[in-house]
Amino acid sequence: MALTDIKIKSLKPKAKPYKIAYGDGLHILVHPNGSKYWRLKYRYLGKERVMAIGVYPEITIQMAKDKKNDARQLLRDGKDPNTEKANKKRTARYNSNNTFSAVAKEWHDLNKHKWTDKYIIKVWNRIERYALPAVGNKPISEVSGLEILDDIIRPIEKNGLTETSHALLQNCSAIFRLAVLTKRAPYNPISDMRGVLQVHKVKHLPAIKIKELPAFLKKLEAHNTRDINKLAIRMLLLVFLRSGELRRLKWEYFDFKKKICVVPLHLMKKRIEHTVPLSKQVLAILEEIKKISGDNEYLFPAINKIKNPYMNENTINKIIKDMGYKGKMVGHGFRTIASTELNELGYRKDVIEAQLSHKDSDQVRAAYNRAEYINERARMMQGWANHIDELAYGKKDNKVLKFSKKR
């Protein structure tokens, strides 16, 4: 009697496993617990072997027949079905660990120690949003440059996101380099693709001119915001850190005997520890800040600490916008003002760049410069603070805003 679904379902378990033949070596093995397994008996190189095909009814009769026929074809080709099955599993397992997504995650994990927390999230979100849906599940060795260009980059460009397209192509190229280095891809298919991208026009963040600073500072002094926010903006002008670095400063980073602030690398955009010499004006501002923040570990503690214990990332730019400078000035603009004016004042470019914490491509030279220029940078920072006082108040008098409003 031929095996049918009705016949197979009617098979009852026994004390010991038993099998019911289907034909051509294919049979059902019934276990004492009632489970039913498809098995194929065959001979290879004169030895009898058995190959597991699957569990009934997950593997139907037709599926079992198809697998049996495939195995018989392998035998006719001189191949062992069990060996081929094991190789297929091994390849699938290898590919699952070497998909574009897996290599991308590995690359991200290897490099994130060099990035700020915000940048870590930004890079992965970009890869996850644009690249993974298109090629994430494919073995990276099978991903072509044309797929990257047509399925990922071009759609981004069509939406006008040329900055994202350039950044993502750079990320993908780095991911492929890791794959090549670890023998998971034969070559980097997008290494020479940069020339085919639409040109990205850099949009510089808005900044007022140096001559507009006196009016800006007067508006700041009169603006209806907390005193500590005004002090933060004045300090940003004098130390020209990035806003994200300033608002996360802790008192422990300051050495008041040496008159420096050492910003740890995890706060810095370039992941390089950064020393800020403190002018007399900045030291005076810090005294005012201390009166407000008190024993808090942060200079600029948050009012609402649900998300972060420090000042909100939008606070400084919102204040500047509310002062009437929408589209004309942002917190980052103080770095632009300082860079432009310090060059005009004749300070050495290398010293200015070091104080702006612009990363030197030569790591040895960068480390040397940070040490070599510290005294020159300290003189420049004091000169800068004096220059701002003279510009805004007509004299170099260690000026600090004294606020009468609520702190």
Image (cartoon, grey):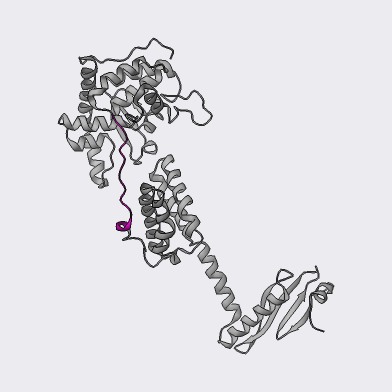
Nearest the camera: 225 or 288? 225
Q: Is residue 337 above or below residue 146?
A: above
Q: Is residue 152 above or below residue 88?
A: above
Q: How far across and how far down the image is residue 17, in percent?
A: 79, 75
Residue 265, image quadrant:
top left
Quadrant where the N terminus is found in the figure: bottom right
What stretch of residues is rendered in magenta? 194-207
Residue 87, image quadrant:
bottom right
Q: Is residue 14 visible?
A: no
Q: At 70% from the left edge and 84% from the top edge, which residue is drawn?
A: 25
Q: How far across and how far down the image is residue 208, in percent?
A: 27, 28
Please check the rendered image and state whether residue 198 is part of the magenta-colored stretch, yes or no.
yes
| Residue closest to the far bottom | 46
Nearest the camera: 391 or 269? 391
Q: At 26% from the left edge and 41% from the top edge, which residue is drawn?
A: 367
| Residue closest to the far left | 346
Please check the rendered image and state whether residue 201 is part of the magenta-colored stretch, yes or no.
yes
Q: At 34% from the left edge and 41% from the top edge, which residue is drawn?
A: 270
Secondary structure mostly taken by the magenta-highlighted segment of the chain: loop
Q: Is residue 67 left or right of residue 98?
A: right
